[in-house]
Image (spheres, rainbow, N blue to C red):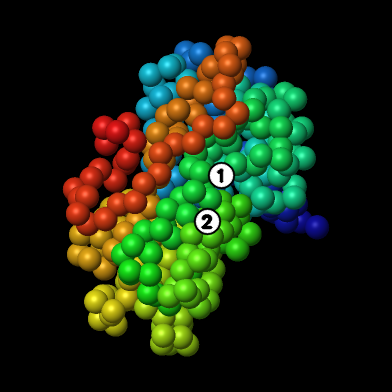
Amino acid sequence: MSRLTVVAYTFGVLFFLVSCAFSVFYGYKVMSHDLPEEGNEIKGYNYHFVLVPEELDNDYWRLVEKGAQEAAKEYGVLLEYVGPKQANIDEHLKTIEMSMASKVDGIITQGLSDEQFTPLINRVVERVPVITIDTDASNSNRMAYIGTDNYYSGYLAGKALIEDTKGQANVAIITGSFYANHQQLRVQGFRDAVMSEQGIKIITMEESEISRVRAAEKAYQILKDYPEVNAFYGTSALDGIGIAQVVEKYKKTDQVYIIGFDNLPETLDYLSKGTIKATIVQEPYEMGYRAVQMMIDLIEGKTVPPVVHTNTRVLRAADLPVSHLGGREAGY
């Protein structure tokens, strides 16, 4: 082997080793979601909390984050907003585990109905206090829950549909998830509300996977397969928006009743135009804000109610204008 070949081979090996080192380092940074390493102290803050949403880029969860960050700023808390970019149970659980390993002072997370969630939370709370937000996990040892009474909100949706349709409707339900506890409760509350109404029939139910595109696809297919459907109930923040897009596209605004969930800007636009007739309003900003307050109280040894239900109400076009933020920033 010539000297030139040896030199080239040596540089090749070195380059390979350096590349591997960088890959491992940045891979770790991605997997750790940039959480501080175990044992590191956070300077200039009273506490360090992590908020784990269902999915990072969801407009609804951004409102939860906005409220939590506002409270964090007021109370001297470092709040990290980390979790799956799109709903993913494995990533959600991994984020909680890594937060515990990073020795944060508190974890605020959406409750999951996954069978792995409860044992994980039971293990985590032995080291770090946990509050569930938006969706409870009442079978776990979580310290407290703050969020919507999801069964009651579904019941409200059913009663609103009865009132608006005068008890005559063939309904299709599009739900964010067949398996998520809060979505199941919203469906069950709705079913119970309309059960005794002979003029209301639930024709079919489809799953959107918390995607407005998928909700639109399901709405289109339903209108094609079930021409008798003249009403939709969407149980996640994006379902009503997806349904409304299809109803407008096929010029069925005057023929199809839509009741959705939440007051995202697009939802309010469709409400003002009359495409969406009603929506169930939650208080995501308030949930986030008060969750941080509750976590501080827990750490400081104060009594915190095990369940705190934030307000839920029906919003119609006649109630506009209204802030899409809800809660504290909307003034109620």
Q: Nearer the viewer, residue 244 or 184?
A: 184
Q: CA distance from mark 1 to mark 2?
A: 15 Å
Instruction: Residue 169 in the image: state x and y as whole percent.
Output: 39, 75
* Disc 1 packing (10 Å; few <14; some 14–19; many ≥20): many
Query: Which three-letter amino acid code belongs to the residue tagged 1?
Result: Thr
Q: Nearer the viewer, residue 79 or 33?
A: 79
Q: Residue at x 34, y 36 (%)?
A: 327
Residue 189 - label: 2
Query: Which three-letter amino acid code belongs to the residue tagged 2?
Result: Gly
Q: Is residue 46 left or right of residue 100?
A: left
Q: Is residue 99 left or right of residue 253?
A: right
| Front: mark 1 or 2 | 2
Instruction: Residue 113 in the image: state x and y as whole percent.
Output: 67, 50
Q: Secondary structure at mark 2?
A: helix
**Residue 211 seen in this snapshot:** no
Q: Residue furthest right?
A: 1
In which quadrant is the C terminus drawn? top left
In which quadrant is the N terminus drawn? bottom right
Q: Residue at x 75, y 47 (%)?
A: 116
Instruction: Residue 102 in the image: state x and y as whole percent.
Output: 66, 27
Tell me where residue 244 sits by quadrant. bottom left
Residue 135 - label: 1
Quick check: 131 above or below 263? above
Instruction: Residue 128 in the image: state x and y as whole percent.
Output: 67, 25
**Residue 96 seen in this snapshot:** yes
